[in-house]
Image (spheres, helix red, strand yellow):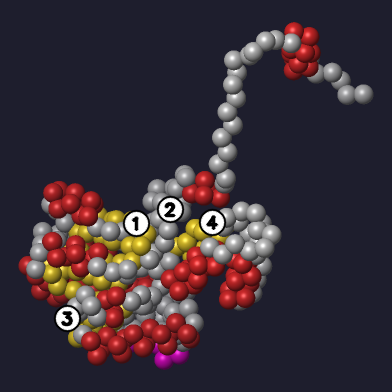
Amino acid sequence: MNFLSGRGSVIGAHLVDHKDVDLIAFTGSREVGLKIWESAGITRPGQRELKRVICEMGGKNAMIVDSDADIGEAIDYSIYSAFGYQGQKCSALSRLILLEENYDRVMERLIPAAASLRIGNPEEPSMMVGPVIDEAAYRRILDYIEIGKSEATLAYQAKDVPPHGYFIPPTIFTDVKPNMRIAREEIFGPVLSVLKAPDLDEAIEVANGTDYALTGGFFSRSPANIERVKAQLEAGNVYINRSCTGAIVGRHPFGGFKMSGGGTKAGGEDYLLHFLLPRVVTENISRHGLAPEKALEDRDEFLWPKPKQ
């Protein structure tokens, strides 16, 4: 392994474009991922292999809460999926889709649950929400919160936020429509959009109605509805009655499709095959004639190797 440190826009671009690099494995933003995919398609002087790309990009992940779901379970896992790691996971919950039948029951418990989160230094075990990664992320997320205020209804925003550091208050928007920016664009922060659907048909349609297909979730106690969502929800990883984050290596191979990636799965047994070139060797072992002396020499050499001089 060779490690090159430096700015991704410089080191990364050089490696992607280099004629001797045959495969690129990337995890990051949609913008950078698409640039890598485009650049890898250009054949450069002296290049001997077609470049291959393993690409995992963003998500706009949705979880649907069925009318018969265990509300307590749905709330716990939704809060963890949306606000754990400050929402800075590509698998984080961004859109919570509630059926009209249970919308009020979920919301009256969702807001207090979000309000119970403590925000501060993550070195303290009691803190659930820490700062986002840097100032650029901090500014971008705050801009999206302002966009949300202009598009939808600010249902909740934490108040007890440390005055110093890049802390973003967990934020929940309601009256969100599928065509709004906060429902379509990846925010990568602790911002949750709540959408309402009259039935499961529309809930699935809304969940699938984005450019991304990374993770998705469904809470229900109906075996028929669970089987239906397993088949119809467009996501590389579909989670039933649990969080939509926290894939375990070796048990939950992870990766998405559409604008979330090329469909490869990290953490599974076949992932390493993407780093290999398959070769097929075919030998006709039906001998056409026999060279006895040579055959005996080969046999003796195999059974009794001669000592080295």
Q: Amino acid at mark 1?
A: Gly
Q: Amino acid at mark 2?
A: Lys
Q: Earlier in the sequence, mark 2 or mark 1?
A: 1
Is residue 154 a member of the stretch shown in magenta? no
User: What is the CA distance from the residue labelled 4 to the residue labelled 2?
Assistant: 15 Å
Residue 180: x %, y % from top left? 24, 80
Q: Main secondary structure of the magenta part?
A: loop
User: What is the CA distance from the residue labelled 4 to the residue labelled 1?
Assistant: 20 Å
Seen in the picture, residue 69 relative to 209 is either above or below; the reply is above
In the image, which is nearer the foreground, mark 4 or mark 1? 4
In the image, which is nearer the foreground, mark 3 or mark 4? 4
User: What is the CA distance from the residue labelled 2 to the residue labelled 1?
Assistant: 8 Å
Whether tag 1 and tag 3 are in contact, CB under 8 A, the answer is: no
- Label 4, on which residue? 52
Is residue 161 a member of the stretch shown in magenta? yes
Q: Earlier in the sequence, mark 3 or mark 4?
A: 4
- Label 1, on which residue? 236
User: What is the CA distance from the residue labelled 3 to the residue labelled 2?
Assistant: 35 Å
- Figure label count: 4
Q: Earlier in the sequence, mark 4 or mark 1?
A: 4
Instruction: Judge the density around disc 3: few (<14), some (14-19), many (≥20) Cα neighbours within 10 Å.
Output: some
In the image, which is nearer the foreground, mark 1 or mark 3? 1
